[in-house]
Image (cartoon, rainbow, N blue to C red):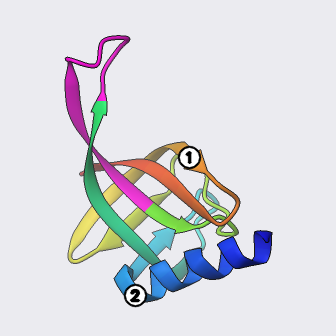
Amino acid sequence: MNEAFQQLGHSILQTFGQSVLLTLADGSTRQELGIIKTEVVELGKYDAIQGEITVLTVDSAVPITRGATVQASGQTYDIDRKIKDNGSLAKWNIYAH
């Protein structure tokens, strides 16, 4: 069952992903498929207050840590924190330079 979800995550990246260049905290770079999009999330404990965040979705196996950067479509982003990891895909909060 877990393999089916990993296959689905891989298919999502193949279909909707774009090529992104990751510069990891150790200075090494790697090319990956990722999805960069804006999401609306609740801010604080009240659902009525919402804000937008930019999110990078990549394969969970990619060894990203806070402080890495990602380049896509001529824009550079700083990677802040992992928001979600379901074992197949990981979502990271990112900030544009």
Indicate which disc, 1 or 2, sits on the residue closer to the N terminus.
2
Q: Is residue 46 above or below residue 94?
A: above
| Extreme residue toward the front, this view | 1
Quadrant of the rendering where the N terminus is positioned: bottom right
Residue extent of the magenta highlight: 42-56
Q: Residue at x 64, y 69 (%)?
A: 62
Q: Nearer the viewer, residue 29 or 72?
A: 72
Residue 29 image position (x, y, % from top left):
55, 76
Q: Is residue 33 above or below residue 5?
A: below
Q: Is residue 93 above or below residue 86?
A: above
- SS label for mark 1: strand
Q: What label does residue 84 carry, if any?
A: 1
> How much space separates mark 1 and mark 2, taking CA atoms?
20 Å
Label 2: which residue? 15
Taking 38 as reference, is 64 left or right? right
Residue 45 visible in the shown view: yes
Residue 68 image position (x, y, % from top left):
51, 56
